[in-house]
Image (cartoon, rainbow, N blue to C red):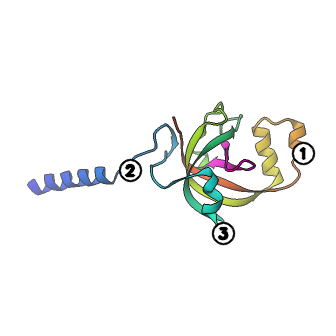
Amino acid sequence: MKKLILSLAFCALATMGFAQEKVEGQSFGEGVTKGNIISANEVNAKLGKETKADMKVEGEVVSVCKKKGCFMNVKISDKETMFVKFKDYGFFMPKDMAPGTKVVIDGFAERKVTSVEDLQHYAKDAKKSPEEIAKITEPKKEIVFEAKGAVIVK
């Protein structure tokens, strides 16, 4: 009996010791654990020549899908944003999130070419005008991030 109690106590302590601390704030999906978080302006460099890489990124929200919060754009430079979608549509962000809000996301960044059809769909979800949507005639090379967790940092 003593061995059983000691074993259970050891397992409980070991589990607590390996538990990782989460980034504080309003959490979505799996949330984000602390450690190895890079700034959004480092995403291109971290990808390097790879097409896809696992990373945690802290950045500033530029816009959120106005239809249901199913995607957002995060600033990665003065001229470029990163399109962020959520793994398996498992969670959404608040649609009324203000531009400039700080977020931390955890998932995979990938260099992709987004089709005209998809770009027009996203523009429609973002409540762009029919004229703005009609101007989308070329596919776009961009970084797309699939987040398994996100935190709005307070």
Q: Earlier in the sequence, mark 2 or mark 3?
A: 2
In the rendering, which numbered label is found on residue 135? 1
Depicted 53 relative to depicted 124: above or below: below
Depicted 13 relative to depicted 96: above or below: below
Residue type indicated by callout 2: Gln
Q: Which residues are magenta?
A: 70-86
- Asked whether residue 9 appears in the rendered view, the answer is yes
Which quarter of the figure has residue 24? top left
Mark 3 element type: loop
Residue type indicated by callout 3: Lys
CA distance for labels 1 and 2: 46 Å
Q: Residue furthest bottom?
A: 49
CA distance for labels 2 and 3: 30 Å
Percent from the top left, x then y, of residue 8?
A: 20, 52
Residue type indicated by callout 1: Lys
Q: Residue at x 18, y 56 (%)?
A: 7
Residue indicated by mark 2: 20
Residue indicated by mark 3: 49
